[in-house]
Amino acid sequence: MKLTVFQAGKGDSILISIGKHLILADGGTGDAYRQFVAPSLAKLAKQDRRLDLVYVSHSDDDHIGGIVQLLRDLVEWRIHDYQKGHGNPGHEKPEWERPPEIKEVWNNGFSEMVGENSGPLVEALGTCARNLLLLRTGNALQESMEFSNLAASVTQAIELTRRIGPDFLDIRLNVPFNGDLMYVTDPPTMVSYGKLQVRIIGPFKEDLKVYRDFWNKWLKDPKNKPGIVSMREKTDRDKKRLYGEMAQSPLKMLMTSAKVLGNRKSVTPPNLASTMLLLKEGKKTVIMAGDGHSDDILGGLGACGMLSASGGCHVDVLKVPHHGSEHNATAEFPKQVTAEHYVFCGNGFRGNPELAVLRAFLDSRMGPTGKRSANPETGRPFTFWFNTSPKATKPQYKKHIEKVQKLIKDAQAKSGGQFKGYFLDKPSFDLDL
């Protein structure tokens, strides 16, 4: 198994390869996808390789944005192929190289999460963002950014659902769950791709209900009045370009679908609803944690029988949840789940990865007795992998990543060879297991 970890802006994007099988886990932000992910995918397309699975952990822009761009590119190439084959041989090629075809998508679609309120929700988020922006206070500006990001994410989630539907790309959705929402089952659902076994370890069904109820309650609040944000006009126009004047049927929305660490109440419902995976190839294990919470990771691992009698677990790779945010990992979690390789995705946005979180993970392996993990593998060598560097990140986040790098260099110097840190300057790095 090989993990190719891309620079992904403030988000995640990882390509998992095992033999002929390929899984793309998230796509980062749209602009990062264009710069770092798309060129690698185009090379795969030229080799006539396809993505067996595109897995979208959740609907936040820094995870879904690149996937939506990937789907847009696929649609543009379908349009180009259609036009050339139906009397328009001079149709201009799309600006971007052809991406690989996709066999299947896993995504807990926003439309099903919140039901019929998904459209009004996007409009309401847009209005709140504009109204808060007018206040020009520090808190209001921050809240405006939050609402704007949520509105963008919701719009992208709706667009993704449409793009993969039968009117466009006709890609299978959530096949293990017959097109419905994916969550932890008893026993856990397992899907195989060659020698790779994939198990769903999050979210739990109750978290999906909380997500849906959260937004429906938000919508019913009279102060949240709708504005105007919609994907329908563009997607309708693209469908006409793809199928010509014969396309008369309307698009249908698919109903498928404080440094106290680990404060679950501070984690947003979309993040708590992250689809999380356990990957196994023989004795090799990888946790793909999305932006989920450590309590839910442990619950999912327990459902898979991965936890020891003392509640611990050691894996080959832990994709650390939510870019190393202080809210998503309790102080105990680094002691409970240890790894040969820890992957931190994030470019310093909002101070992630948090220095306190990094220290907690370091202490779990090299700290004083009270902070060290009781797992028998604790004394083994281990590596922290970062998908950015002071050189690669945006200027406004450089100082934070420099602090991260200094912390890692100091820890490495004191580790006696047990610990190493790696910072990414290139578009991606490969982690071979």
Image (cartoon, rainbow, N blue to C red):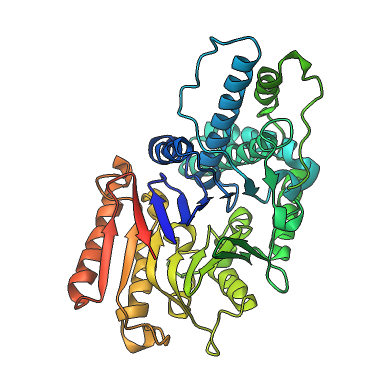
The image position of residue 400, as x and y in percent, is: 30, 53
From the viewer's perspective, tell me whether residue 202 is left or right of residue 312. right
The image position of residue 342, as x and y in percent, is: 39, 66
Residue 197: quarter of image: bottom right
Using the image as rendered, state which of residue 104 and residue 252 is in the foreground.
104
Q: Residue at x 38, y 40 (%)?
A: 36
Quadrant containing the N terminus in the rendered view? bottom left
From the viewer's perspective, tell me whether residue 150 is left or right of residue 336. right
- Total count of labels: 0
Answer whether residue 12 is visible to the viewer in this image. Answer: no
Residue 89 position (above or below residue 249): above
Q: Residue at x 61, y 58 (%)?
A: 275
From the viewer's perspective, tell me whether residue 189 is left or right of residue 321. right
The image position of residue 146, as x and y in percent, is: 54, 44
Residue 217 position (above or below residue 379): above
Using the image as rendered, state which of residue 347 and residue 304 is in the foreground.
304
Using the image as rendered, state which of residue 232 and residue 353 is in the foreground.
232
Q: Residue at x 61, y 38 (%)?
A: 156
Quadrant containing the C terminus in the rendered view? bottom left
The image position of residue 293, as x and y in percent, is: 55, 65
Residue 224 position (above or below residue 282): above
